[in-house]
Amino acid sequence: AHFPTASRERVRMTPPRLTQEGGRRGSANANTLRRRILIVDDDAVIRTLLVDVLTDPGYQLDTASNGAAAIEKLERQHFDLVVTDMVMPKANGLDVLLASKRLEPDRPVVIVTAFPSVATAVKLASLGAADYVTKPFDVALIRITVAKVLALHDFAKRGHRDEDRRLQAGSKGTPSPY
């Protein structure tokens, strides 16, 4: 493997540009390998900050400026993860969470809120939120939370596939130990 070093070559670290629709530009092959993340916040400054923080070659980012727009996008497109504000006009973060779970029950949703409480955290967890981050947030915490949630989701999916393979192997005449 070849790893660039400062002395041998220069590494270009330019963040990708967003298209008008909120998605990042790139080749079709690159897009198929990226994890699609929908960022939802009615505050344009926070939305832009989240896009800047989560810009990564492994992520294809899209945005929605309110919960209703997010739900429309979730109905039309597949996303691997949703990061949504809790308090928004038209539809709130809870509405986005419930719509996401109705459309794709296994899709993780991270809720970001400026109004944290234990009761809210418990309610969101019971409704299927993958994680909960409070504002103001540490940008490193957002990156770590997104990476952790996606990794746990991948691990769970892999576990289900392995279990399905074991069950299929067992139904093909493999003797049961019981």
Image (cartoon, rainbow, N blue to C red):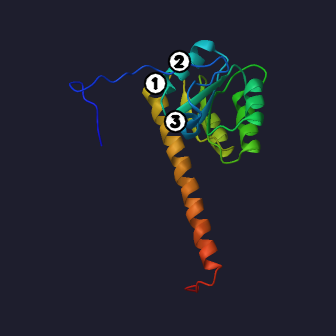
Q: Nearer the viewer, residue 136 or 1?
A: 1
> Secondary structure under badge 3?
helix
Say whether disc 3 or disc 1 marks the residue closer to the N-terminus: 1
Q: Which residue is mark 2?
A: 49
Quarter assignment of residue 50: top right
| Crowd tier of the residue under label 1, counting other residues whose Cα lies within 10 Å: few below 14, some 14–19, many 20 or above | some
Say whether disc 3 or disc 2 marks the residue closer to the N-terminus: 2
Location of residue 106 in the rendering, given as x and y in whole percent from the top left corner: 66, 48
Residue type at mark 3: give it: Val
Q: Identify the residue at horizontal 50%, vertical 27% (top origin).
A: 54
Q: Which mark is residue 36?
A: none
> In the image as oriented, which residue stretches furthest toward the left?
7
Tell me whether circle 3 and circle 2 mark residues in contact (CB < 8 Å). Answer: no
> Secondary structure under badge 2?
helix
Tell me whether circle 2 and circle 1 mark residues in contact (CB < 8 Å). Answer: yes
Q: Which residue is mark 3?
A: 146
Q: Which residue is mark 1?
A: 139
Q: Identify the residue at horizontal 65%, vertical 23% (top origin).
A: 63
> Secondary structure under badge 1?
helix
Picture quarter with the N terminus: top left
- Measured in 3D between alpha carbons, the distance from the residue under mark 2 to the one under mark 1, in whole angstroms, is 9 Å
Location of residue 18 in the rendering, given as x and y in whole percent from the top left corner: 58, 19
Tell me whether circle 3 and circle 1 mark residues in contact (CB < 8 Å). Answer: no
Residue type at mark 2: give it: Leu
- Measured in 3D between alpha carbons, the distance from the residue under mark 3 to the one under mark 2, in whole angstroms, is 14 Å
Q: Nearer the viewer, residue 70 or 36?
A: 36
